[in-house]
C-alpha cells in the first residue's frame, strides 16, 4: 500500500511550521492525530511513524490526517511567535493551528449546503517533554466543538510530578544556557541506542547544536510548571473518564510507551521487559489501570518511534482496536 507523502506547511494564523500527510482536502476525516516532539527535538522525528501508519492503511485516502508540529524555537518554527515561552501559550498556538486546518478541511472544501460541524476523533501523541504538551492539549480540548480526544500516546516520558513551579531565575539563565550547550552533545550519547541510525543521530545532534538554549530553558520552565500539576491533571482525567463511562460515552485511552529510565543512581539507561520506570509508577498512582496500556521496548533508545517503529505501530494497532 502506498505511503502518503509528508508535506511541510506553515500556519498563516500562528506561523507554526508543521508536517502533514496531505495538501488537499480529506473527504471525510475519520481521525486526526496531533504529534508533539520533545525539548530540543523537532517534527521530523515523527516521519518514520507517520510513514509506517499511512503504509498500513491509515492514510489520507481513508480519512486519516496527521499534524506533526514544530514547537516555537524548534525545527522551522521561529521563537518570535512565542516571545515569552516561560509564561505558556504553546497549547493555545497548537489548538489554533488544529482549528485552522480543520476549518479548511470541513468548511472551505465541503460541498455547498454541507457545512455541518463534526466531532472528530483525535489522537494526541507526545514524545519526551512533549508528553506534557499533549497532556495540556488533552485538557484544553475537553468539550471542544470540533474535536473529541479519544486516545493519548505518551512516548518515553520521564516526568514524575516532582518539579515545583518556582520563579524563573533570569539572572542565571545565560550561564546555565552556556553549560547546557557545552555538555549537551556528551549527554545525547545516552539517548541513542544500538538501533539508532547514524543519519538520525547526526541530524538530532545538529538540531541540538543549533538550539537557542536560553529560549529552550525558558520553555523548560513552563514544562516544570505543567509537571508540578501533573498529578492533579491525571486525577481530573480519571474523574472525567468515569463520567464519560457513566453516561455511556467512551473514555480517553492512554498508551504509555517506555524505552528508557531517566531517573535513579544509574543515570539514563535502556529497559528490559517487566521493568517499571519512575514515570510509569507515577501515572499508576494517579490514573486507574482500566484506562491505560503499557509497552516496554527493550534495549533501545529514547526515540522508540524512530528506532523501533514497527513494534510501536503494532502496539498502536491493538491499542486503537480496543
Image: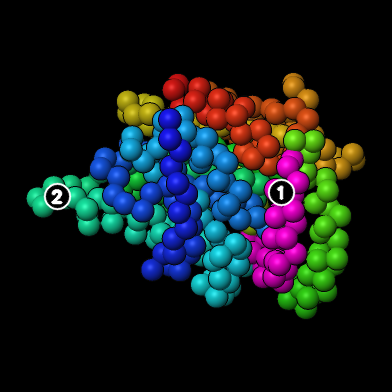
Residue at the image position 38 percent from the left and 68 percent from the top: 12
Color scheme of the displayed model:
rainbow
Is the residue 65 above or below the residue 14 in the image? above
For the C terminus, give its image quadrant: top left
Residue 190 in which image quadrant: top right
Q: Of helix, strand and loop, which one carries label 1?
A: helix
**Mark linked to residue 279:** none
For the N terminus, give its image quadrant: top left
**Disc number lying in front (1 or 2):** 1
Residue 151 visible from this viewpoint:
no
Is residue 188 rendered to the left or right of residue 287?
A: right
Q: Who is closer to the viewer here, 308 or 237? A: 308
Residue 82 in which image quadrant: bottom right
Is the residue 250 above or below the residue 34 in the image? above
Q: Which residues are magenta?
A: 196-222
Label 1 – label 2 distance at C-alpha: 45 Å
Q: Which numbered disc flags the more N-terminal residue, 1 or 2?
A: 2
Considering every residue shown, the one lying at the far right of the view is 265
Residue at the image position 54 percent from the left and 66 percent from the top: 77
Read off the residue under disc 2. 111
Read off the residue under disc 1. 199
Which class describes the residues within 10 Å of circle 1: few (<14), some (14-19), or many (20+)? few
**Where does residue 132 sit, x and y in percent of width and height?**
59, 49
Is residue 303 rendered to the left or right of residue 275?
A: left
Amino acid at each position: 500500500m502506498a505511503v502518503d507523502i509528508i508535506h511541510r506547511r506553515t500556519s498563516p494564523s500562528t506561523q507554526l511550521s508543521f508536517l502533514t500527510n496531505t495538501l488537499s482536502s480529506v473527504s471525510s476525516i475519520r481521525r486526526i492525530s496531533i504529534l508533539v516532539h520533545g525539548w530540543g527535538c523537532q517534527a521530523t522525528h515523527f516521519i518514520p511513524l507517520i510513514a509506517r501508519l499511512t503504509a498500513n492503511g491509515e492514510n489520507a485516502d481513508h480519512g486519516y490526517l496527521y499534524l506533526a508540529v514544530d514547537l516555537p524555537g524548534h525545527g522551522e518554527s521561529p521563537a518570535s511567535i512565542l516571545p515569552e515561552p516561560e509564561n505558556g501559550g504553546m497549547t493555545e498556538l497548537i489548538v489554533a493551528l488544529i482549528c485552522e486546518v480543520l476549518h479548511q478541511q470541513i468548511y472551505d472544501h465541503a460541498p455547498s449546503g454541507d457545512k455541518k460541524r463534526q466531532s472528530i476523533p483525535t489522537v494526541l501523541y507526545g514524545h519526551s517533554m512533549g508528553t506534557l504538551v499533549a497532556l495540556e492539549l488533552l485538557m484544553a480540548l475537553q468539550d471542544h466543538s470540533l474535536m473529541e480526544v479519544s486516545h493519548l500516546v505518551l512516548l518515553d516520558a520521564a516526568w514524575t510530578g516532582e518539579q515545583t513551579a518556582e520563579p524563573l531565575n533570569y539572572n542565571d539563565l545565560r550561564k546555565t544556557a552556556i553549560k547546557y550547550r557545552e555538555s549537551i552533545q556528551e549527554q545525547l550519547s545516552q539517548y541513542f541506542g544500538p538501533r539508532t541510525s547514524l543519519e538520525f543521530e547526526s541530524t538530532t545532534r545538529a538540531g541540538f547544536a543549533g538550539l537557542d538554549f536560553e529560549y529552550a530553558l525558558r520553555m523548560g520552565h513552563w514544562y516544570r510548571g505543567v509537571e508540578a500539576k501533573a498529578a492533579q491533571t491525571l486525577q481530573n482525567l480519571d474523574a472525567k473518564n468515569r463520567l464519560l463511562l457513566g453516561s455511556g460515552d467512551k473514555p480517553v485511552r492512554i498508551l504509555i510507551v517506555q524505552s528508557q529510565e531517566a531517573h535513579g543512581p544509574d543515570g539514563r539507561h535502556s529497559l528490559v521487559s517487566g521493568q517499571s520506570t519512575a514515570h510509569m509508577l507515577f501515572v499508576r498512582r494517579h490514573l486507574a489501570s482500566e484506562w491505560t496500556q503499557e509497552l516496554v521496548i527493550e534495549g533501545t533508545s529514547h526515540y522508540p518511534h524512530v528506532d523501533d517503529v514497527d513494534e510501536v505501530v503494532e502496539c498502536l494497532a491493538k491499542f486503537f482496536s480496543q
